[in-house]
Image: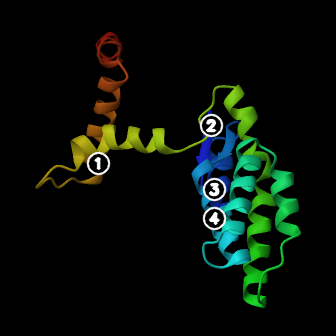
Amino acid sequence: MIALGDGAPWVWNVADGHFPTAIQIVDLYHARQHLAQTAKLIFGSDSDPQSQWLRARTEELDAGRVEAVIGALGRSKPKDSASQAALEREVNYFRNNAERMRYDDFRKRGLFVGSGVVEAGCKTVVGQRLKRSGMHWTVRGANAIIALRCLILSGRWESFWESRSAA
């Protein structure tokens, strides 16, 4: 079981509370967004040095070498004190989530490192059924339909009803 999140501390608190044995992974695309924001802090607007720096950090991140990313951030010199404070927040983001960013290891284990698959699943299970034109649901009704939809899409419809009739 894995818990994919954007790296916010509250996400991991929820994951720890409900899924304490789950492998926690920061969504790769969120981590890359943090790198892109950091590149802008350091270099300002788009430039060749910014692109080169970002490409090198992205390769390190994708390889799970978070310490190299943190080291590069630590050697960076932003242009003003506001950018320095923002850079420190980004360093803490990567430092606090380092073990959740071992993307090379996660991929070797066959784990997803991006939330796109989960988001697509939600769109398929929930969106296609509950978000049609003119539909209005109570929470109870939506939960019931989602449960039935999950049974159908997971191929457990027949076994669920067989177990219900045997009870």
Contact (CB < 8 A) between labels 2 and 3?
no
Label 2, label 4: how far apart the Cα atoms are:
26 Å
Please give the residue where the numbered disc 4 appears in the rendered image. 36
Which residue sits furthest front?
48
Report the residue at 10% width, 55% height from top.
134
Give the residue type that dot 4 points to.
Answer: Ala
Contact (CB < 8 A) between labels 1 and 2?
no
Looking at marks 4 and 1 on the same chain, the residue that comes earlier in the sequence is marked by: 4
Please give the residue where the numbered disc 3 appears in the rendered image. 32
Please give the residue where the numbered disc 1 appears in the rendered image. 140
| Mark nearer the viewer, 2 or 4 | 4
Label 4, label 1: how far apart the Cα atoms are:
41 Å
Residue 27 appears in the figure = no
Looking at marks 1 and 3 on the same chain, the residue that comes earlier in the sequence is marked by: 3
Q: Name the residue nearer the viewer: 48 or 131.
A: 48
Whole-percent x, y for residue 139 in the image: 29, 52
User: Under tag 2, what secondary structure?
Assistant: strand
Q: In this view, does 86 lie to the left or right of 69?
A: left
Q: Name the residue nearer the viewer: 76 or 166.
A: 76
Report the residue at 74% width, 62% height from top.
53
Whole-percent x, y for residue 23 in the image: 69, 38
Give the residue type that dot 1 points to.
Answer: Arg
Please give the residue where the numbered disc 2 appears in the rendered image. 2
Label 2, label 3: how far apart the Cα atoms are:
20 Å
